[in-house]
Amino acid sequence: MKQSYYIFNNGELKRKDNTLEFYLEDGGRKTIPIEQVRDLYFFGQINVNSALMNFLASCHIAVHWFNYYGYYSGTFYPREYLVSGKLLVKQVEHYINPEKRIVLAKAFVDGASANIYRNLRYYKNRGKDLSNIIDEIDYYRNQINVSDNVESLMGIEGNIRKVYYTSWNEIINQDVEFEKRVKRPPDNMINTLISFLNSMLYTKTLSEIYNTQLNPTISYLHEPGTGRFSLSLDISEIFKPLIVDRLIFSLLNKNQINEDSFYKETELLQLKESAIKTIVAELDIRLKQTIEHRELKRSVSYLRLIRLEVYKLIKHLLEEKVYEPFKIWW
């Protein structure tokens, strides 16, 4: 079974015949069977050459780079091998037609907010005082359907997130002061965790899109731009509450991550390498977690749910079935 490989050590990754060899800086060597690789994550300083990149491209393997501070730097996105002119035309058509675009943009916000709502209900049922926040979320969710442009939808989505974040001090058992989302630079433990895990989910979603015929630069909620795969942002939005937010709650409430997991550098609060390894390991476990899919009638992993979402979007674009966003049902 293919899986993600995470490289934290410094060294050199090379092609060795028809597989991969990693030469560690300290003299060690590891073999990575190419047939088992879904994608690669570089956290250390990794030297590569053109022979390796050509080999990875021929094997359709994406590489996601993170810098010294654990921030996402970029992705080596191999030449697309699953192409469809018909689907590309449909993708563009649904972007340039305001009536078609708003349908998809609303669906992404609806799915994301429904999953936020489900998280809040989960913790309310466990004794957390969240009734007022749930009412506020309900208020903003009712505005989604009456919104008639993407800008106002983004505003609603922002308001929902803003209210949602006020609940985190109640949900998280550690004494962490979290008032608002700060990205550049993240100024406390929770903002640092959100930034890191949102980046990881973005790359996971991008890898799933790569293995379909969709073009990752044409999106509907987030504005397409240069230098980013904005469709990955659209789809990630739906899965943040299930994968990112719940993982943060779990890591902090189980004390797997605490103040000792960070160090301060100028204005940046950085994750230590040991903490990144813990988070990545827990994320992998979570993505392999399965649920009984009520439509497919079989077990499906969280990672597979993302691919299924991409397939549902393709069917919508081809006008085979109206897209309905994933919503947590358990």
Image: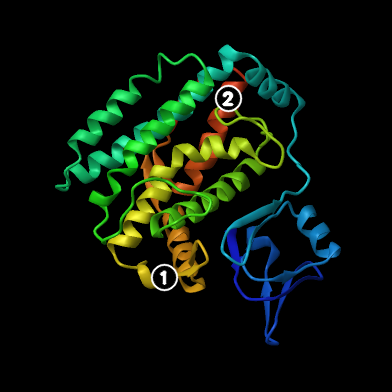
Residue 261 is tagged as: 1
Q: Say which of 53 and 145 sits in front.
A: 145
* Percent of width and height locating residue 84: 74, 29
* Percent of width and height locating residue 312: 53, 29
Q: What residue type is labelled 1?
A: Ser
User: Residue shown at 78%/71% (left/top)?
Assistant: 14
Q: Residues within 10 Å of mark 2 (few under 14, many from 20)?
A: some
Q: Can residue 294 be seen in this view?
A: no
User: Residue shown at 32%/54% (left/top)?
Assistant: 249
Q: Which tag, 1 or 2, sits closer to the chain's start?
A: 1
Q: Is residue 79 left or right of residue 184?
A: right
Residue that label 2 marks: 315
Q: What residue type is labelled 2?
A: Lys
* Percent of width and height locating residue 221: 55, 28
Q: Which residue lies furthest to the left in this view?
A: 127
User: Secondary structure under badge 1?
Assistant: helix
